[in-house]
Image: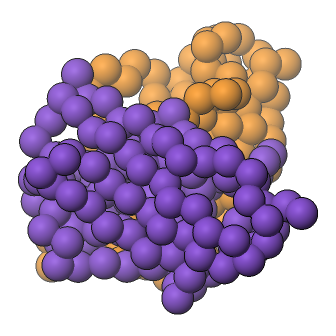
């Protein structure tokens, strides 16, 4: 089974500053046949279902603000919020879909400092 | 507008059964794979099960294999999860989620989620 580990578990960032969340997979999620990383990011606000932000590691979902970006390849990935806004307070999850049995990271809680 | 509405949650005793439903609208349900994902109170997300658009391919998490059964009725635009031999650790909000890849043959990312239905397993 592929295990996803996020770091940190929580972080507090000042409004307008950069927030960086890391996600590491226990094995590569890069399919060499199509050169795609099978990694996605979600945002979950309290009392709401998760919302898709990024897929294929770096493709932003339609309607997602461009302050959100995804990067990385193989086993190490990053979600960056370039300028944190109040509405970005949430828990963020990475998820691999390289395996037919998807797996999520444990989540990273982002708060305002 | 894509809508997914779960129902069927509630309080059930350990060892009991429950059937969840998810009503889909706003898209061609028969063309998309679907998933169930759960979230225990205050915890993270856990993928539970996947079913392809034609029901030909099904996957389960090890934690529910042999106890849960996923199914769908494309004529009724509905997804189901039959849960048997329920345990306290199955207590969670259960979400149905659409797979983001059209006519996919396995689970990818989830582009639409329902609001969830709460299942509580307790005596």
Residue A14 percent across, percent down from the top left: 76, 16
Find residue A20 and report its horizontal and vertical position in percent: 63, 39
| Colour representing chain A | orange
Tell me which corner region of the image, top left, top right, bottom left or bottom right, holds residue A16: top right
Chain B pictured colour: purple
Q: How is the image coloured?
A: by chain
Foreground pick, B70 / A66: B70
Q: Residue at x 51, y 33 (%)?
A: B115
A17 lies left or right of B97: right
Q: Quadrant of the C terminus of chain B?
A: bottom right
Residue A78 in sight from this viewpoint: no
The residue located at (26%, 61%) in the rendering is: B72
Q: Position of residue A98 (x, y in %)?
A: 36, 73
Residue B37 relative to residue A14: left or right: left
Q: Is residue A72 above or below residue B93?
A: below
Position of residue A47 in the picture relative to residue A75 (left or right): right
Quarter that holds the N terminus of chain B: top left
């Amino acid at each position: 089974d592929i295990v996803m580990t996020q770091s940190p578990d929580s972080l507090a960032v000042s409004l307008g500053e950069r927030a960086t969340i890391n996600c590491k997979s226990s094995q590569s999620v890069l399919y060499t046949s199509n050169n795609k990383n099978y990694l996605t990011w979600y945002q979950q606000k309290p009392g709401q279902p998760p919302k898709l932000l990024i897929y294929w590691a770096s493709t932003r979902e339609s309607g997602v603000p461009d302050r959100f970006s995804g990067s990385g390849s193989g086993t190490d990935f990053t979600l960056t919020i370039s300028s944190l806004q109040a509405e970005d307070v949430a828990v963020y999850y990475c998820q691999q879909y390289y395996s037919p049995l998807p797996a999520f990271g444990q989540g990273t809680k982002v708060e305002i400092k | 507008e894509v809508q997914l509405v779960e129902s069927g949650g509630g309080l059930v005793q350990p060892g009991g059964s429950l059937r969840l439903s998810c009503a889909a609208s706003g898209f061609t349900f028969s063309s998309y794979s679907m998933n169930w994902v759960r979230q225990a109170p205050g915890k993270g997300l856990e993928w539970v099960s996947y079913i392809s658009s034609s029901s030909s391919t099904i996957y389960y998490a090890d934690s529910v294999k042999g106890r849960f059964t996923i199914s769908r009725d494309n004529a009724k635009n509905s997804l189901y999860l039959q849960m048997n031999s329920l345990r306290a650790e199955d207590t969670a909000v259960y979400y149905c989620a659409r797979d983001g890849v059209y006519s996919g043959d396995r689970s990818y990312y989830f582009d639409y989620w329902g609001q969830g239905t709460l299942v509580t397993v307790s005596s």
